């Protein structure tokens, strides 16, 4: 059944398909003609939206393991309303802890030299769920001017120390073999 508005009919007159004109739609179901009222059709359409939208929202919250040199960080999402504390760990990373004790590492879109010394750090998005590459931003004051950085990756980590290790692994250049 399609979710669209029925064609107007005159009340009390028989419709062209032989059913009484009720403002509803006529459809075939298992070889029988079924008349569905406009309120029933609207309810079915709304039910379809209610089921579809949360399902789409869950697509981005599926955890995908991303291993970085032995340290396991899992891509995840968190609710902005549950953030307890956050602090910059390096020029491109911000650590977040939620009220429920979950830990996350945010990777920003670029290197911000003064991020470790920034003040007034906030996380902003049009939705309360923060995920990788959804347009969420970290805003902070850098030497008196407001800077906004896009969050490109959100990863769940075991603790703040684990987040520091992931940052260290990603920012420390590998030793080149001598020879």
Image (cartoon, helix red, strand yellow):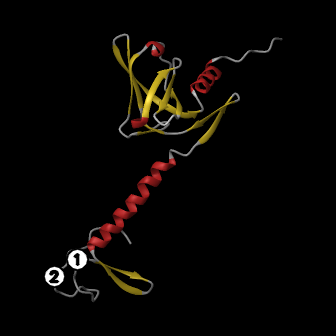
Estimate how packed mark 1 is, as few (under 14), some (14 to 19) or many (20 or more) residues with alpha carbons within 10 Å: some
Name the residue furthest left. Answer: 11
Q: Is residue 61 left or right of residue 27?
A: right
Residue depicted at x 70% and y 27%: 69
Q: CA distance from mark 2 to mark 1?
A: 8 Å
Quadrant housing residue 29 = bottom left
Evaluate if marks 2 and 1 touch, with contact meaning CB atoms under 8 Å apart.
yes
Residue depicted at x 21% and y 88%: 14
Q: Dot 2: what SS?
A: loop
Estimate how packed mark 2 is, as few (under 14), some (14 to 19) or many (20 or more) residues with alpha carbons within 10 Å: few
Is 86 in front, or is 31? 86
Q: For mark 1, what is the residue?
A: 23
Q: Position of residue 72 (x, y in %)?
A: 65, 33
Is 177 in front, or is 90? 90
Q: For mark 2, what is the residue?
A: 11
Q: Position of residue 41 (x, y in %)?
A: 32, 71
Residue depicted at x 27% and y 71%: 39
Q: Dot 1: what SS?
A: loop
Question: On residue 58, which mark appears?
Answer: none
Is 178 in front, or is 164? 164
**Quadrant placement of the N terminus:** bottom left
């Amino acid at each position: 059944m399609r979710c669209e508005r029925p064609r107007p009919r005159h009340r009390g007159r028989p419709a062209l398909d032989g059913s009484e004109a009720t403002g509803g739609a006529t459809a075939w179901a298992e070889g029988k003609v079924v008349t569905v009222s406009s309120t029933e059709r609207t309810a079915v359409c709304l039910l379809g939206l209610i089921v579809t939208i949360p399902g789409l929202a869950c697509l981005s919250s599926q955890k995908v393991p991303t291993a970085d040199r032995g340290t396991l960080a899992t891509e995840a999402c968190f609710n902005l309303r549950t953030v307890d504390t956050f602090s910059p760990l390096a020029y491109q990373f911000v650590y977040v802890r939620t009220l429920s004790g979950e830990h996350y590492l945010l990777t920003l879109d670029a290197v911000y030299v003064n991020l470790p010394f920034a003040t007034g750090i906030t996380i902003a998005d049009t939705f309360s769920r923060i995920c990788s590459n959804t347009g969420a931003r970290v805003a902070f004051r850098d030497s008196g001017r407001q800077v906004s950085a896009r969050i490109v990756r959100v990863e769940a980590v075991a603790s703040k120390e684990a987040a520091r290790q992931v940052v260290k692994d990603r920012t420390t250049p590998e030793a080149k073999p001598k020879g």
